[in-house]
Image: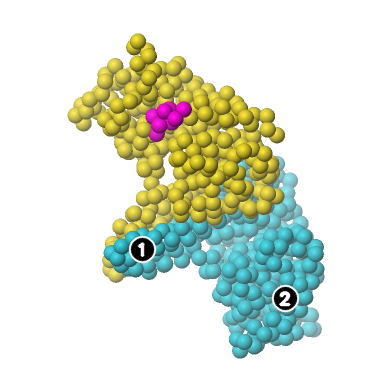
Chain colours: A yellow, B cyan
Amino acid sequence: MENSINNSVCRIIVDAMGGDFAPQNAVLGAVQAVAEKRNMELFLAGKKEEILKTLAENNLSFKEENIIHCSEVIGMGDSPTAAIKGKADSSIVVGARFVRDGKADAFVSAGNTGAVMAAATLIIGRIPGVGRPTIGALIPNTSGISILFDVGASVDSKPQHLLEYAVMGTIFAREIYNIENPTVALLSVGEEESKGSDVVIQSHKLLKKTNLNFIGNVEGRDILSGGANIIICDGFIGNILLKFGESFVTFLKSRFLNYARKSFTNKLRVGIAKDSLKSILKEFDYQEYGGVPLLGINGITIIGHGSSTPKAIKNMVLRALEMHEKKLTEKIEISIKQYSNLQ
Amino acid sequence: MENSINNSVCRIIVDAMGGDFAPQNAVLGAVQAVAEKRNMELFLAGKKEEILKTLAENNLSFKEENIIHCSEVIGMGDSPTAAIKGKADSSIVVGARFVRDGKADAFVSAGNTGAVMAAATLIIGRIPGVGRPTIGALIPNTSGISILFDVGASVDSKPQHLLEYAVMGTIFAREIYNIENPTVALLSVGEEESKGSDVVIQSHKLLKKTNLNFIGNVEGRDILSGGANIIICDGFIGNILLKFGESFVTFLKSRFLNYARKSFTNKLRVGIAKDSLKSILKEFDYQEYGGVPLLGINGITIIGHGSSTPKAIKNMVLRALEMHEKKLTEKIEISIKQYSNLQ
């Protein structure tokens, strides 16, 4: 009876020690999520004493039996695979084991990205048929958003992997962003099928054989103009692009400040422009989206930015809940099977 | 006697039919360059009648014997290799042949980029020891500029090619930008030597063995923060990054306009902010730099943006002159020899 009740709601374990402001932001975000949604069971993994202290300091309460004490912490700078092996009682390893053992449906962490990916892949494991999991990033564009896969889960992807990213991305965009028949494009250096790296040219041929809504290649300039709902690339490129884009926002801010320093008139101008600039650059703010899913793992895994705020953590939890309710993992498994022998 | 006079000055041939506003902008830019510098001999390659008409309409004069008539034109959309083979009397083919035959020291074109690259590589040929030529792009950063190599001359570069880009880029930055000992970095997904694609990991090992000022890997976020003077990547990534960066500027402008449309107060705000925004985004304006060199070709080759203005064309000619005077080609040949057997 106890068991059936537990299984009817979504069980999510949050890494309380993950991120630059742990446990503070993770704990606050988790409590906010619980306050907002009743149809889930939340767990906090981490140093119990520190979690309780954070709760007390903020006059908050959290079910004590749902605090899963872990004696170790994987730092943001730790080497991922070594940390997973060496720190068996860390919140990241324990969180992943909770999902593997069926005690939770989803794992949410703003901790060491590499370690979370390694734990998810090695401990929870991949969905049958998936060669490589993938991380997607939301990019604002002139007509809404695009999602870029992969942004750093793996490098030197083979055509079969890029195909998998496209399949998983399609399901994600359809289920979570309600895009009925999401367009899928390959990121390349020209629109022609013959343009691009060897891997991209081979991937193009593969994608044409699927029943995905594949619209061909797009170029770097098409990312922000909304060339496709889903844009597929190797994780090496996606990671560089994402970090470059984020730094563009920082760069612009610093340039506006420099400009303001030059004269009093400039200062006034920038002062007046500030609100418009803020409102525009807000679109690039990851907090609104609250973390990114690691698709292809046999259990929902959401990875957040190291500097995640409580709001970002809360949004990550709500995203995990939605992915569970919409049976993302099961749908990916069914869809990926279709293409397992495509060549 | 005639010959020795011709050889003492730099001879540059400009593609009059290249670019979206040909022959207008190319002709105007060439005339402006001649007016500014006396120590060069300029040629215009293209349809003589159209060139003369443009000169007449603008009340300009240009030495008629230096107008090299070409009956054909390679369009911006033509397939590069096919066009080079099929249009033997086009301005791009004739310009490249002028350099190959020793009648000019440099070729400048704002025409079909792929066709200019193909003509330069196939007709002029590579500098002995260079496996692949490379195109660099200037990127503004918080402390000045960085130069990104390669931005699209070739994809699927091998470690030896990335090494060549680093060698050529170092000479370019030193000679043209007067950076004494330019820092060189590899673009990757992490600073650690072990991070990145296979090719990047192998390239890192090669670069460490050179006497270049190699500072290791930089990430996408380090491009605009001035992580290195020269940033090396495969042309597939460089091209996507460059086009993404350019589109970011366009995207921001459109967002500011959208914001302004929302209310009268917003409109006022953006109106006041306009000058600051313009001044900041101007740094990303390619016209100031006037085209990019194709390094590794056995003769100076400068490629411009299709939408090059007369000012951009003029700057391309002056850049070609400077590269000739500083003996870039000869210096690259000497330097590249040093590393030809590095493994």
Q: Quadrant of the N terminus of chain B?
A: bottom right
Question: In this view of the protein, can residue B110 be seen by the observer?
Answer: yes
Q: Residue furthest front?
A: A180
Name the residue rendered at 44%, 49% in the picture. Answer: A144
Give SS at disc 2: strand
Residue A284: image location, x then y, percent:
41, 49
SS majority, magenta: helix
| N-terminal-most mark, 1 or 2 | 2
Residue B45's label in the rendered image is 2
Name the residue rendered at 64%, 85% in the picture. Answer: B55
Give SS at disc 1: helix
Side of A222 relative to A267 (left or right): right
Magenta extent = A319-327
Name the residue rendered at 50%, 41% in the picture. Answer: A180
Q: Quadrant of the C terminus of chain B?
A: top right
Residue A176: image location, x then y, percent:
44, 37
Task: Tell me the kind of residue under disc 2.
Answer: Ala
Residue A37 appears in which quarter of the rendering?
A: top left
* Residue closer to the observer: A260 or B114: B114
Residue A92: image location, x then y, percent:
42, 25
* Residue closer to the observer: A290 or B175: A290
Which chain is disc 2 placed on? B
Query: In this picture, is B182 found above or below A209?
Result: below
Residue B261's label in the rendered image is 1
* Residue closer to the observer: A209 or B237: A209
Query: In this picture, is A184 found above or below A328?
Result: below
Residue B20: image location, x then y, percent:
62, 70
Q: Can you tell which of label 1 and label 2 is closer to the viewer?
A: 1
Question: In this view of the protein, can residue A313 be seen by the observer?
Answer: no
Task: Tell me the kind of residue under disc 1.
Answer: Arg
Q: Residues within 10 Å of mark 1 (few under 14, many from 20)?
A: few
Which chain is disc 1 placed on? B
